[in-house]
Amino acid sequence: MSSPLNPLAQVANAALEQDTPAVLAMLSQRGKRFFFPAKGILAQGGEAKQKAKTANATVGIATENGAPMHLACVNKYYQGLTPSEIYDYAPSYGKPDIRAAWAKKQRAETPSLGDHPTSSPVVTNALTHGLGLVGDLFLDPGDPVVTSDLMWENYNLNWETRLEAQFHYYPFFDEKLTGFNLAGFTQAIAKFRGKKLVVSLNFPNNPSGYTPTKAEADGIAKALTAEAEAGTRLVVCVDDAYYGMLFDEAADKESLFGRLAKASTNLLAVKIDGATKEEFVRGLRVGFITFGVKNGTAAAYKALEDKTAGLIRAYVSNISNPGQSIVLKALNDPDFRKQQAEKVATLRARAAVVAKECRKPEYADCWDVYPFNSGYFMCLRLKDADADAVRVRLLDDHGVGLIALGKREVRVAFSCLAEEQIPNVFSAAAKAVRAVRGK
């Protein structure tokens, strides 16, 4: 038997019930129980930080000479950051200045959002943590999740293994391998009409490297809106890990979050994004989770932010302060966009070489090429050869590493290949396919 709800959870739930009742119904039992301890140590410490001008004996940090105590042998590796930007605890919601800066960036990059209100981004320990928070807030054991067959395996570990959700798959590409399988997607979500459903959308897609065209993206948004209006309570997780890395003018330039955040009162859009890939700072582990729903109010969004921050407080307390400090300084650097564009151009050039090499006529007997136009990856569908057997042969005989996905697909991460390495990767892969098939 579960314990009674904390009064602060009751307040948050009441705000959702008042303004966005469908969102309250989307929450998992855990999500309904959670809250941020408004009078807890961090909250009291934050209040004291503003008002305790004589002495502050609240937060469990050591200080020296008016700054956080630290070791010189550690501090010498940081340049351009003050001790407070490195050694202080960050708030469980994230540092206010980086939350504001990221929200400004999101809105500038998503014109379809217009002036529609959303929550303030809550800082996460990068995108995996963000996905975990989505699961904690919205998934109970047995709850259905619809996702494509081409997906990042951490979704399964996070939502299926850890939280016991039930996954349902549709083929990512159409039968002719010309683009996104809108018909299959529409059929997959229609099977749960009238129920609660979590849908995962990851573009640019890992592992395929495909971003839908604008027409395809419009079709996805239209299908989801229609299901929501038909009574399905939809939580749509928009995984924008590789946002902005587009190599084809046909690929839609915007995150689907902009369309979905104002689509229906029965559709909660949850944007998971971060500096990990966008700023090329994978090891800093700084991501964000943002909520959007039609008729969303400040009170409803605050309830979702409080529940999210409560979960963060419960098992990691807060996210890296130096990581947030560095990302914020990068966002505010006048050369940020220029340097970012230079790195994306490098990836675009690699993708162009891959597109030429993988489609050479002499490899037609070895594989079909899945469409790709963005991100870090592309995929091959092997012909009459087991993917893992090819992976092992390729590694043992040629010293080339690829990722095997299921029985037939292999993923190529061209993001970590120099242009001059790319031809040999596909030449060796073809030899490995033929060697395996020859057995």
Image: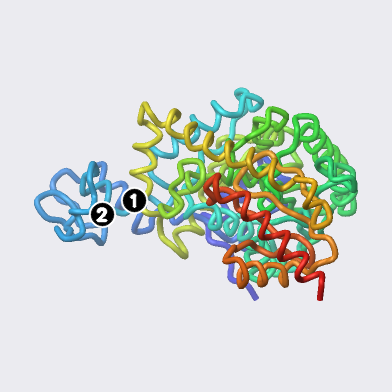
Q: Quadrant of the N terminus?
A: bottom right
Q: Residue at x 36, y 26 (%)?
A: 334
Q: Residue at x 57, y 56 (%)?
A: 133
Q: Which mark is residue 87?
A: 2
Residue 278 rendering spot, x and y as whole percentages:
50, 41
Q: Closest to the observer: 62 or 374?
A: 374
63 displayed left or right of 260: left
276 displayed left or right of 376: left
Residue 328 rendering spot, x and y as whole percentages:
37, 38
Q: Closest to the observer: 146 or 4?
A: 146
- Give the answer, above or below, for where 82 lies relative to 386: above
Q: Is there any visible trace of residue 133 in the rendered image?
A: yes
Q: Amino acid at mark 2?
A: Tyr
Binning the other alpha carbons within 10 Å of mark 2 as few (below 14), some (14 to 19) or many (20 upward) gives some
Q: Which mark is residue 193?
A: none
- Helix, strand or loop at label 2? It is helix
Q: Earlier in the sequence, mark 1 or mark 2?
A: 2
Residue 261 rendering spot, x and y as whole percentages:
67, 35
Q: Residue at x 57, y 47 (%)?
A: 304
- Give the answer, above or below, for where 170 lies relative to 226: below
Query: Could you tell me how many numbered marks the image carries?
Result: 2
The Cα atoms of the two marked residues, 1 and 2, are separated by: 7 Å
Q: Closest to the observer: 57 or 72?
A: 72
- Give the answer, above or below, for where 261 lies relative to 57: above
- Dividing the picture into quarters, in which one does residue 40 lie? bottom left
Q: Is there any visible trace of residue 17 in the rendered image?
A: no
Outermost residue toward the left in this view: 65
Q: Which residue is mark 1?
A: 321
138 displayed left or right of 287: right
Q: Amino acid at mark 1?
A: Asn
Colour pattern of the rendering:
rainbow
Residue 207 rendering spot, x and y as whole percentages:
68, 53
